Amino acid sequence: MRTKLYSVGALVCAMLAGCSTFTPADTERGTRSAAPPPIEWPARDLAVLRERSAKTPELVMGFAWRKDADQSKATDRDRYVTSHADFTVFHNAVHGLALVRLFEDHRENNHPAAWPKIRLGFEASLGFLPNGTVITSRGLTAEHAMLAATHQSQWMDFSNASREREGEQTVYSKDPLNSRLLSGMHIRIPPRAESAPKGLVLHLHALQANPGERAMQAEMVRRGWAVIDVQTDSRIAVPLAKRNREAFEKAMMERNIAWTVAFHGFHVAGPDGRGKDVVVLARPLTMAREFKAAAAKMEKLSEYEFELTASTDAAELGAEIARLTDDALASNAYGVEAIVMYLREHRQDLLQGPL
């Protein structure tokens, strides 16, 4: 009993002391003649960025005619959405180590029924409506991994898919390039103003939108500064726990099959050609339940960790975690650098004051 009390007393003393230790500074640090080695910045592949740039059209359509569509049965709404672009890309070039694509978003006019949800999604997750994206080759690698995980081809042509419900076929489908344009770090560059701003704030947002950031930005704008919004990209691919991988992959396949069958519908117009958009579903109730059940399994199995065992080299594992962290943070630096390079070439009006 006394031993236990002594142990508890020692623990309390340690807690009161802050559980801290003291290590003196290296007194020779400032007298060494050899300079530290330069930082090795993570490499990026410019070839894949130029390839993506070449595949980005000036007009990005949200919907396209199905190859087997009978256009004689099309409504006015069908013809409208297949002839009006959702995005007009006005800048598409590689700057430094990142691809910068800026666009005008026409979805508010093209899809008035869906636009409130689209807008709310951006404001809730980002805190702003983007008018451009910046992506590095790391972002493309992450995108390919996501597509592989969901069993989708990089450039899947949805127009070949047959979607039927009670014998009625949709006549157009989503263009897969739409989501590719929105890949990467979302950004918002303000339009030209009548007078030059006092300065420019390049604001790297937190992982989730929050009122504090919005209030700070609004105050800077009120004081005459311009603000560029930049979505940070600091996600690190932590391995899925080995014990869950097989079950996780099985659940993911079940979820993807359910999604494809039940939820991969397309918007179709109302009877008058201007009615509220609806989604064509195949076996919606059954497959919706299967999708939710599989997604719930994945959620329970979603344990990500770097495994450290008796046979693990702790130094090598630490170095790998450091490398992944450097690689993620470098994307933010490359993205900001690309934005500044774009501004120097095309928007000198924003660089008349401090940055």
Image (cartoon, grey):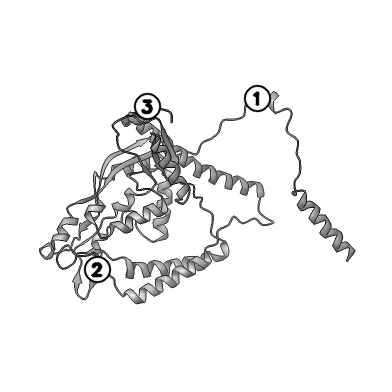
Closer to us: 301 or 253: 301
Which residue in the protein does label 3 denote? 352
Give left or right: position of 268 versus 207: left
Give left or right: position of 318 versus 164: right
Where 313 sits versus 303, above or below? Answer: above
Which residue is pictured at 26% across the width and 69% down the height? 280
Q: Quadrant of residue 194?
A: top left
**Residue 205 at least partly seen:** no
State which tag comes first along the sequence, 3 or 1. Answer: 1
Closer to us: 132 or 261: 132
Which residue is pictured at 42% across the width and 40% down the height? 219
Which residue in the protein does label 2 denote? 163
State which tag comes first along the sequence, 3 or 2. Answer: 2
Q: Quadrant of residue 195?
A: top left
Instruction: Give the amino acid at mark 3.
Output: Gln
Instruction: Give the amino acid at mark 2.
Output: Arg
**Residue 208 at least partly seen:** yes
State which tag comes first along the sequence, 1 or 2. Answer: 1
Q: Name the secondary structure under disc 2.
A: loop
Q: Nearer the viewer, mark 3 or mark 2?
A: 3
> Residue 103 in the image: x percent, y percent?
28, 43
Specify the quadrant that holds the N terminus. Answer: bottom right
Where 68 sits versus 102, above or below? Answer: below
- Using the numbered discs, state the Cα–Cα distance from disc 1 to disc 2 in whole angstroms: 68 Å
Closer to us: 328 or 38: 328
Check contact, mark 3 vs mark 1: CB within 8 A: no
Which residue in the protein does label 1 denote? 34
> Residue 215 in the image: x percent, y percent?
44, 45
Which residue is pictured at 89% across the width and 63% down the height? 2
Instruction: Give the amino acid at mark 1.
Output: Ala
> Residue 125 in the image: x percent, y percent?
42, 53
